[in-house]
Image (spheres, rainbow, N blue to C red):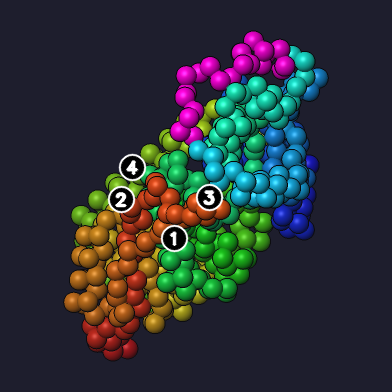
Amino acid sequence: MSQNNLQQDSTQNARVTWEGCSVLLDINDGDRLVFARLSPASTLKIGNKQCSLQPLIGCPFGSSFQIETGTQGPYLSRVLASTQDNNVQEKGDSQSKDESRDNRAIVDNNTAQCLTGDDIDALRRQGATGDEIVEALIANSATFEKKTLFSQEKYKLRKQKKYAPRVLLRRPFARSICEAYFKKYPARIGFMRVDTLSLLLSMANVTANSDILIVDMVGGILTGAVAERLGGTGYVCNTYLGTAPYPMDIVRIFNFSNEICKRIVRCPLTDLSLAQNGISEQIDQQDVRNMEMQSNSVSMEEITVSSENGMLELVPETTVSPVTKTFKSTKAGEKASQEAIKLWKENGFSSLIIAAPDMDAWSVVKELLPLLSYSAPFTIYHQYLQPLATCMHHLQTRKMAIGLQISEPWLREYQVLPSRTHPCMQMSALGGYMLSGTRICSSEIQLQENKNA
């Protein structure tokens, strides 16, 4: 299948997977999160079983699959949600009858289970499914009926994860990708939490037909989120200091169409800052050398990590066949055209978003802020507070922006279950800090404009 056909299929129905698309596989309710590219030859290793991903092609996102054993080995079988809903309803009806039970009389001495490991292996050789093995374990447990309803659910869930693991097919978009990376490898996205990412887009006023200027040193998650919100309108200009552009491999996971990929461009800061409206502010040469060294080292580190662990996987157990290399996403991040650069120099950008945790915030802002149009919003993300406080002080003293504020996003996740609603025990304490404001025309720039006129 050609790449054009792949993009046409994704444009016609984005809710159904197609051959060559990227997916997020949620194994056992978040125990493992794996990015994979679907093809007839791609495989996924779950435990000690190697399963083909071909049954996932053509299924809607949100489908659930379970490992079954057939004549040709283990395979992924789709699980219907209707049977699960009926079981949940039956449990809810019997909950009132089991309120008097407790676990005080149960002694965990490893003698309650009558089935041995050899018996379970014999069931597998006979072709028993994972659900049948779980039911056999429940039937041969001497203490299962004495447990409370909550304990029974935990017991069944624990056995199901071991003998009948399930895979949830999720669509990779800004929230799911950010949550997956933040859970497994938060350093690759600068420890940016999903609520921080959404607040960055909101405070920067990322809307349709906008031209957004971005400094993305967090793997491309920010570029992909902005392009997803624009929806094929406007432009996302990813600028960089020095000669080497920053890697944005995460953009390839979004399954963007050709139209959206054309709106993601790259342009060095030197091309944008030359003769900006007849004004060019001088920059210290030592700062330039320091920023180039930092940007080059970060890009090489990201490329090394990407080449070693693979872009499409978060867990080393995942194996993707070499055949999947033929199904590549449309390349995003081409160099911006001269017509677009000239238009941005004349009118300025609509918004500015900076996510450069490894660089000094003020050194970047003082070069990029003149590229914005007047009254345009900007947002700056950093993992720590002090660089943003220093940048805010310089912006106030030089009267370059108004409405400056430093925000600390805060998120609390709740577990919502029957009679068990409470905050989650393990939560992220820090999601970084964000500096936002609006660019204005300072008196110094007005005097310089009058002199040039």
Which residue lies at the image location 75% right of the left edge and 44% below the top edge? 83
Q: Amino acid at mark 4?
A: Ser
- Looking at the picture, how far across and down is residue 363, in whole percent? 26, 61
Question: Do tag 2 and tag 3 residues touch (Cβ < 8 Å)?
Answer: no
Q: Are marks 4 and 3 in contact (CB under 8 Å)?
A: no
Q: Which residue is mark 3?
A: 177
Separation of disc 3 and disc 1 at Cα? 13 Å
Which numbered tag is attached to residue 358? 2
Crowd band around label 3 with a 10 angstrom C-alpha radius: few (<14), some (14–19), many (20+)? many
**Is 398 left or right of 354, judged from the image as shown?**
left
Q: Is residue 271 above or below residue 403?
A: above
Residues rendered magenta in the picture: 103-124
SS class of the residue under badge 2? loop
Q: Which circle, 3 or 1, is nearer the viewer?
A: 1
Q: Is residue 84 visible?
A: no
Q: Secondary structure at mark 1?
A: helix
Seen in the image, is 203 located left or right of residue 8? left
Under tag 4, what secondary structure?
A: helix
Say what amino acid the circle numbered 1 marks. Answer: Asp
Q: Provide the residue designation for mark 1.
A: 195
Q: Is residue 418 above or below residue 142?
A: below
Closer-to-camera residue (123/153): 153
Residue 374's label in the rendered image is none
